[in-house]
Amino acid sequence: MSEIQKVFRSPICVVVGHVDHGKSSILDKIRGTFITATEAGGITQEIGASLIPSSTIKEVCKDLLKNIKIRFDIPGLLFIDTPGHAAFHSLRKRGGSLADIAILVVDINEGFKPQTIESVEILKEYKTPFIIAANKVDLIPGWRTNNKPILSSIKGQSPEVQRKIDEQIYSLVASLYELGFESERFDRVSDYTKQVAIVPVSAKTGEGIPELIMTLTGLTQKYLSETLKVNLGGTAKGTILEVKEEKGLGETLNVILYDGILRKKDEVIIGNIGKPIVTKVKAILEPLPLNEMRDKHAKFRQVEEVRAAAGVKLIITSDEEVLSGMPIYSSNGNLEELKQKVEDEVGQVIIETDREGIIVKADSLGSLEGTLFMLKKEGVKIRSASIGKITKKDIINAESNSEESNRVILGFNTSLTKEAQEYLNRVGKEKVRVITRNIIYELLDDYKQFLKELERRKVAEILSKTMRPVKIRILPQFIFRQSNPAIVGVEVELGTLRAGIKLMNDKGKEVCSVRAIQVDKKNVDSAEQGKQVAVSLDGVTIGRQISDHEELYSHISEEDFRTLKKFRDKLSKSEIEVLKEISQIMRKENPLWGV
């Protein structure tokens, strides 16, 4: 029967790599579109998908095909374009699990970065074969762009440029070797089953793009033919990439279908937090070839059915809230079995929260997972994590935290409701810190900066209540009064002298306190190292308790000493030096003082 026949589908290729290394730009060059220009910060924040049909592949690679005989059995290549930032670990991981093969994009001038390494680890986990696109060759100093194939172009460069290219490629080879992979420039690969191919490319000029596509297509056809066969009579399986509200259509689901065939009016099961959603397919909208689903100018056509692999937009009959990142299956009379399967699958990504911590909001499940992944990696406690706009309830929830560091709301790709903004204005923004960004690393950087500022203020407050270390020397030629109070000239040898502190001698005995400090007959609160100032000293007579040339130290309690030791990185070098002298003096009588 034709309904159960197995046919070749388009291979699913995931594009991964470090932020700003050119993933979307490479696809743009192939498609002739400009997706990157419409994205926040020019950086991909969501997974997208686009089909490159075999006709386009033949056109892009026409010059190469003159010398190489390859028969095209696949209908095209379905690309999943993923975010490069580490915070999108779960999104990229989900994309990686769908992929048959991958392109790892690396800036040839920068080499491997943290998210490059993370991408390799994910591909290794799923045993996904991949090739390297060594991008931005046009930025190598001295590079001359031409319309020749990449190998001919390299041969036409100066010896210095050729040497630089070889150096950068073998740097990539070394990085891959450390991660457990052998690799080589694509034309030097002796065994594609054992070596990762590295293709030098430029997304800007298009150099190397035909070789990249040809290598990718050849590998999928030669080594993945069995995995590319789909059962047209089986259950349709897919993943929801994004949920969007669109003018004239209502709520739509951007879906990657990776197995089976989906038809209009099919019953489908969609994963959810709680019970799965059971609904029917109202309409299937298929993007025209080379159109990217995320592009607001993308063109679609309505179809009765769609075969894997494909990226499509679905309209369903249910009005229940659907979350991005969830699995979707069609039902062929096995509804209860599939519902349980979906529940088990979703159960693996349920978000765990802590009793105490900050509030996190995001526009989708994938974005929320990604944000939480990074925060928990940093050891941040999460009290509440949910999808949607920041509400008044969220602010009240954050406000109730006892710790100021937890009175924070982080919002990724979302904003405050009008009611929440009005309430925040009433209670004061200093009560609850709300940080929203549509670029994930900026959100995390802002949050870290807030914590640093909070820590700085806390430490400053603690140190303001702590006796600081100082060492002064009485200047014998400046004894203005001997007692009641004694007024003398002193030089601050170490640390900073402050009014109100108690002073001790080099035996550790408290002898007086500083009533006031004067410079040019004007009272000041403090005097720094090297300054000569006049001070009035209470409770002492010069010549009795202290001599007219004596060195005095701040009389620090053990508790203050321990506090200063804890925050020694906030002290000046001279304060640390005098603190050591004070501890040596005090430990003559008590060896355990301050320990």
Image: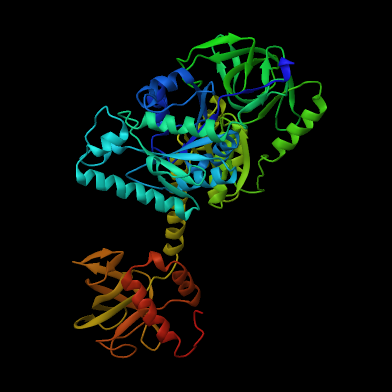
Q: Is residue 8 visible?
A: yes
Q: Nearer the viewer, residue 142 or 157?
A: 157
Q: Quadrant of residue 475?
A: bottom left
Q: Residue sitting at 38 percent across and 40 percent down?
A: 187
Residue 146 x/y as whole percent: 24, 29
Q: Nearer the viewer, residue 495 or 502?
A: 495
Q: Is residue 34 above or below residue 452?
A: above
Q: Is residue 291 visible?
A: no
Residue 129 x/y as whole percent: 53, 40
Q: Quadrant of residue 60?
A: top left
Q: Is residue 231 above or below residue 113?
A: above
**Left or right of 261: which side holds 525?**
left
Q: Residue sitting at 34 percent across and 43 percent down?
A: 108
Residue 502 x/y as whole percent: 39, 76
Q: Nearer the viewer, residue 249 or 355?
A: 249
Q: Residue sitting at 53 percent across and 33 percent down?
A: 222
**Left or right of 133: which side holds 519?**
left
